[in-house]
Image (cartoon, rainbow, N blue to C red):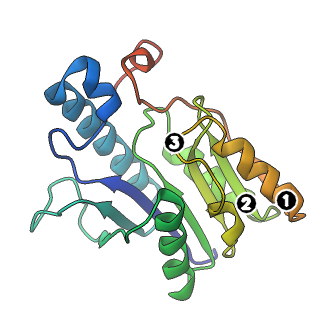
Amino acid sequence: MRDRLIIAFLRVPEPGRVKTRLAATVGDARALDIYERLLKHTMEEVQRTGLPCAIWYEGTLPERSAWIPHGFHAEQQCEGDLGERMAHAFEQAFKAGHAEVLIIGTDCPGVNAEIIGNAFEALTDHDVSLGPSRDGGYYLLAMRRMIPEVFRNKMWSTGTVARDTVTDLRSLGLSFALLPELIDVDTEADLADITLP
């Protein structure tokens, strides 16, 4: 098996700092509870893969966080927009010698160890694996080498991100595998279509 790394990209769970669009209608306390449940679910599924994981967080990390599984390395995200922060995390992972790197968000109750495993397996004969979300973004991106273009010229947190990423990959002549479309929880309306873990 090639040297693989999962990067979990997240915000430190704090009231008023996570799920702000959701909090606007359900309140900070409920939004925090939902975020913590989604975060715990994601960490459990990542652990099920048996693969190493680096947690890249935004915010101030407590000295020891119960939601960081034992053995998972934690690193603070750099400054910049989402694309710049993801690009930096990928660059560091490839520089460290990992052959296949996957980044995953923590907003998606439908994500599981099997989907993560399939994303890596697809890299056997594809340059990129992409997990599109219903809102037009993506919940997962896996690559076997650094491709800076996928992190540039995007309107992050909009409905065009996944489409624009696919356009970039096609223009670069790169192959990609699309994973199942899943729902990211961003608003109260999303809660009607999912089962919270």
Q: Which residue is rendered at x = 41% and y = 58% of the image?
A: 8
**Vertical comparison of 94 with 26: above or below:** below
Secondary structure beneath label 3: loop
Q: Which residue is pictured at 14% across the width and 29% down the height?
A: 29
Q: Which residue is mark 1?
A: 175
Tag 3 or tag 2, which sits nearer the N-term?
2
**Looking at numbered disc 1 in the image, what kind of residue is underneath it?**
Ser
Residue 152 spot, x, y in % from top left: 64, 63
- Disc 3 marks which residue? 157
Q: Nearer the viewer, mark 2 or mark 3?
A: 3
* Image position, residue 17 (x, y; %): 22, 44
Q: Is residue 53 left or right of residue 135?
A: left
Cα–Cα span, label 1 and label 2 = 7 Å
Label 2, on which residue?
128
Any part of residue 110 in sight:
yes
Q: Residue at x 61, y 34 (%)?
A: 159
Q: Are marks 1 and 2 in contact (CB under 8 Å)?
A: yes
Question: How far is the residue under mark 3 from the one under mark 1?
Answer: 24 Å
Q: Nearer the viewer, residue 109 or 90?
A: 90
Q: Residues within 10 Å of mark 3 (few under 14, many from 20)?
A: few
Measured along the vertical axis of the image, is residue 52 above or below residue 166?
below
Ranked by sequence position, the earlier of labels 1 and 2 is 2
Residue 197 in sight here: no
Q: Is residue 124 above or below residue 28?
A: below
**Secondary structure type for disc 2:** strand
Q: Earlier in the sequence, mark 3 or mark 1?
A: 3
Q: Amino acid at mark 3?
A: Ser
Question: In the picture, residue 79 is in which quadrant?
Answer: bottom left
